[in-house]
Structures are given as structure tokens and as C-alpha cells.
Amino acid sequence: KRRSYANPISSLPPPAENAGLYKGLKELKELISSYQGLKDSGRGPSIVNSIITTAITCNLDKDIKEIPTDDSDAKDMDQDMRDMIVGKVYQKLMEIESRLLPCGLHVVGCPPSAEEAVATLVNIAGIDREDEEILALPQILAQSIGRDIETIYRANDEGKLEEVQLLQDITEASRAMVGGFVSKASDPSGRLAAGALGALGGMFGGASVALPWGDALKGTQFDGKVDVVAARKLFEYLRFCLEQVVKDNELGALTEALNGEYVLPGPGGDPIRNPKVLPTGKNIHALDPQAIPTSAALASAKVVVDRLIERQRVENNGVYPESIALVLWGTDNIKTYGESLAQVMLMVGVRPMPDALGRVNKLELISLEELGRPRIDVVVNCSGVFRDLFVNQMNLLDRAVKLAAEQDEPFEMNYVRKHAVEQAEELGLSIREAATRIFSNASGSYSSNVNLAVENSSWNDESQLQDMYLNRKSFAFNSDSPGSGMETKTEIFKSALSKVDVTFQNLDSSEISLTDVSHYFDSDPTKLVAGVRKDGKMPSSFIADTTTANAQVRSLSETVRLDSRTKLLNPKWYEGMLASGYEGTREIQKRLNNTLGWSATSGQVDNWVYEDANDVYMKDPEMQKRLMETNPNSFRKMVANFLEANGRGYWETSEENIERLRNLYMEVEDKIEGVEN
């Protein structure tokens, strides 16, 4: 739109469902259920032994440090230890099971099925809407038994078995309530129908009218205790959301645009975070760039920054990270109203402030007393789109970092100043110049092109990818010379990266995750930082996941494993993709290619991810046939990806697997070329 005067028309995201469990993960859940019923009997320890063995088989020991080795015996553990291990495994299973993922592709003009709508509405209902004075459904359920959902989330994250079970009960009750509500709005085919929605209207009268969620809570611990007024208000909001989903004017808007007619404008964004972007079929626009970050974004950012710094401190023997390298995306900041922008400012201990007209263009230094920790240095890599859209915010960021660097504070409490002073001496610059931390591409240029090199297999070694990143991303923004554009500052960029302890990115939408697009690894500097650090140490790498109300900070390797389990290796996901035919197979190949990209830029992909993917897609003759028939070109690329992963040392496997892949490659080549054997 910005570049070619096009008219973009919004469409719904692909139909979303919970990832669910399969194979060994499903077996684990059944074992945990058995343990909860029999833990006080003599069978408890033997069930825990089975849980440990199955968890190790499913590679969950990579995520759960508390899982003991296979040869340990649960009989030697006390009850608390057994409960803790089972609780940690259960918490990880629920994290996998409840993750929202797109199943297949969205068909323009086709409303979602009732089942697909439930998963989306449960996630919409899971977020407090303070502007509308609407409480989230998990909070309403928690309050009905005298608890607060935030304390349940924290205890769940710690793996306390009773709390993990309570959160699962709340999740299941939420799904049942929304499911009962949506079932009244679907037609006989299971699709949501505008006509059927009228039947929902009668549910929102006086107290005598049946509850919108029907009998969903019968027999549960929440039955009869729920605040009916708060719950009705929430379900009235869900009815509005459901109506917007079904209104769907995608085909109508498409034909109007092709006829050169006026298409109604509307905001773009994530329908779960902001259902006001519905209905689809609008000429989408973004937001006022001077209005971000909002106060709500600042509050969300503080939660993530605190958790990120605390996690790194705990894992680093109580030592704070001195510098964090992070990425700012244009579209993500539009969707979150500047959350990641606010994160950068909070790291350096500066608060963005609005002026009298509400434009965020002022800064306020947060005192060290209020901050309660050192000011953390940052190295910010802005995407090309962010640079184009948010030049005012880049100015604000640069001023914020330089403001922190100029404070006369002890080095151990101000790492921004500490590093700026070191760099000023090393490079012969003023402190203000040495505190340059906001980088991007040259004006008019986009991406580091690492993604293109990985996609086309046109790179020799990792140092070549790192040079591409350095050459294309070392252009600095300088608020002291407005209007001068981006200036080449390779030496400052390398010097700043050489002090980085942590690399960090954000995930803010359930539609797009780490391996769904190549942009994330294209902007990942993890191995580059190890290359420019004087001690050659690999930085810690974290990903913040704010796709649910319970925001998480996971390591990069944990996130890649979660992504692989819920998508690439998940029958629910790949069957949904294969049902979409040619394009679905291409999507599967893309995920594999992006996984290879993460190996190249970060080295954080486990061997078993490739091994299990090979078992799913390459070992099974029936699966080979389906992939070959739907999209032979993407199938050939998949085979090539596996061979490349092995050739570059990212995947160690048997000679038998490699031989099969070589033969498959020749077979698919012959098929594409039309050679008959």
C-alpha cells in the first residue's frame, strides 16, 4: 500500500485450533491422570517411573531440568519430589496442548466452523479488556473459588501439581462454556451462520433467562459460584465478536476493489488482541505512529522485561545481563501498540511520556531507586518497515539511550554509560556518539538477506551469513542530526554487539511463530555476537511469548522445540495443511526450511527435531506419496533441506536415512522432469 498505492483487503487468519496432544505426549497425559488417582497407593512410584521414561522418549527432559535420568527409581524419592516431577511434566504438556495454531489455510469468504470459532473465542475471552470493563473468563472462574488467576499462573509456571490441575480445570471449563455458547450459533453443517446468531440474542435478558453458557459448569467446582453479571457482560462481548467474524465481507470488498469502487477503511491487527479489527473485508490502515507506546503497552512491556532480566539473572548465578540485542518489527508494534518499543526504553530505565496533545515525544528518566536494578544496555535492530513507519520513535529511542548514557551514575548500576565510556575511549568518540544503539538497513533497503541465502542454499559457511548481517544492518540512526538518514557505523555496531550477553525477540500473535516466517532468523544475531565477542561466548537467547494472557519468557531452544511439537511434528497441523493441497505442502516445506535457518543463525535446534521430522515425512511411503502428488517441487525442496541439514552438520543420523533421502531426491527429480523408469 505504502509503495504502490495498492488497496489491501483484510481477511481472517487461518482457522485456529488448540494444538492438542499425540503419540507419546497423549500417553503421558493418561499416565499423569492415573498417577493423580493412585499416587497414594503402592502403584504411585511405578507410574512416576513410567512418566519419567515416556517423558525422556518424548525429549521433554530437554525442557524440564528436574526430570531425573532413566535409571533413577521413583521409590527412592519422597512424595513432594514425585509430585514436583509430575507437575512439571503436566505443565509442559498443557502448554503444548493449549497452544493455538492455524490449521490449514483461510478460504476467502468462508466463515469458520463452530469448533474453529471456539478456540479463537476462548483466547479472546482469556484477556482482560479494561477499556470495556470486561473481566477475562479465567479470572471470573478463579474468583468464583476465591482465587486470583495471576497467582494460579505463577504457581502453574513453577509446576505445582495441584495448581497445574486447577489451571487445566479452568481452561476446560472456559472451553466448555464457550463451546456451549457457540453450539447455539451454528447451522446443521457445523458452520457459523448469520441467521443462527439471532438465536443468541434472547440469552441476554433478565436473570430468569437461561445462561449463555448453558449447563457447561454442572458438576464442576465452579457450578453456582460464578459472578453471573460479569460473565454475562463477557458473553455479550463474545456475541459481538462472533457476529463480526460471520459478517465477512471479504469477497464483496474484493469485487468492489476490482471494480475500482470505494472499500470501507478499518484498522488492521490481531483479532484476538483487538477484536475491533473485525469484520474483515476492509481497506486496512495502521495507527497514528506518534501515539505509541500506549500506557497499556508500557504495562505489558514491564512484565516481560522484568521476567526476561530475572530469568537471565537466575541462570547466570545472580549476575545481571549487561547488554541485550533485540529486534523491533514494524507490523508487530502496530499490533501491540508499541510493546517492544516500550521494552527497549524500560531496559535502559527511561519512561516515554505524552505531550499535551497525547503525542509520545517526551522522556522521563526512571531513578535507580525506582528501577531497583542497573540500567541494561541495548543494541536495537529495527526492521526496514519499522524504520519507514516509525522515524519519530527511532528518534525517541536514540534520545532515551543517550540520556541514560549521560547520567553520572556508577558503572555497576549503569551499563549503558559503562559501555559508552569504554567505546568512546576505544574508538575516539564523544560519549554521546559512542552511545549509538539504534541500527537498521540503509534507507530504502530491507532485511539482512540471510533468509534468501538459506532459502536458496547459496551460502558457503556461517561466517558468510554473519558478514551479510553486519554489512546490511550496521546503519545507525542519529537523533542529533535530524533528516540525515541512516549512517554507516559498522565499527560502533560491532563494538556494541561484542558486549551483548542476551539476544531477544518477541512473539505477539498465535498466527505467526518462529518457524512460520523467515524474518525471525533473518534478524537473529546469536552466532554473530559469539563471533565478535572477545571471549567467543555464545549469548543466551530468549523469546517472549505474549500470545496469551500468561506471558512467558522462554529460551530460543525451548521455543523452537515448542514450535516443532505443535506444528511440524503435529498430525493435527500437517493434516490440516495437506488438506489445503499444493499450497499446504509448500507451507510444510517452509517450516522445515526456517528450522534449518535457526540452526544456521543460532545453533539452537536439537538433533531430534530433524530426526522426528524425517520419521514423519520421509520414512512413511504413504506420506511421501501424498507430498509428491500435491506438490512435487516442495517435496524435492524438503528432501534437499534434510540432506543440507546433515551436510552442514546440524543433523546427525544413520547412513540408511541419508541413502533413502538421496534415492528419493533422484525419484522426485525424474518425476518433475517427466523421466519414466
Image: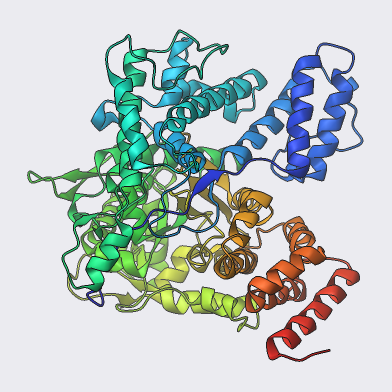
Q: Quadrant of the N terminus?
A: bottom left
Can residue 399 be seen here? yes
Task: Name the image colouring.
Answer: rainbow
Can residue 82 be seen here? no
> With respect to residue 41, does 598 lie above or below?
below
The image shows residue 651 at horizontal and vertical percentages of 77, 66
Q: Is residue 448 left or right of residue 29?
A: left
> With respect to residue 191, does 489 lie above or below?
below
The image shows residue 52 at horizontal and vertical percentages of 82, 34
Residue at (58%, 30%) from the top-left corner? 157
Q: Quadrant of the C terminus?
A: bottom right
Could you say which quadrant of the image residue 358 lies in? top left
Residue at (31%, 40%) from the top-left corner? 243
Q: Is residue 244 left or right of residue 590?
A: left
Could you say which quadrant of the image residue 398 lies in? bottom left
Residue at (62%, 34%) from the top-left corner? 94
Furthest-left residue in this view:
356
Q: Nearer the viewer, residue 5 or 361?
A: 5
Q: Nearer the viewer, residue 365 or 475?
A: 475
Could you say which quadrant of the image residue 108 lies in? bottom left
The image shows residue 586 at horizontal and vertical percentages of 58, 70
> With respect to residue 646, does 281 lie above or below?
above
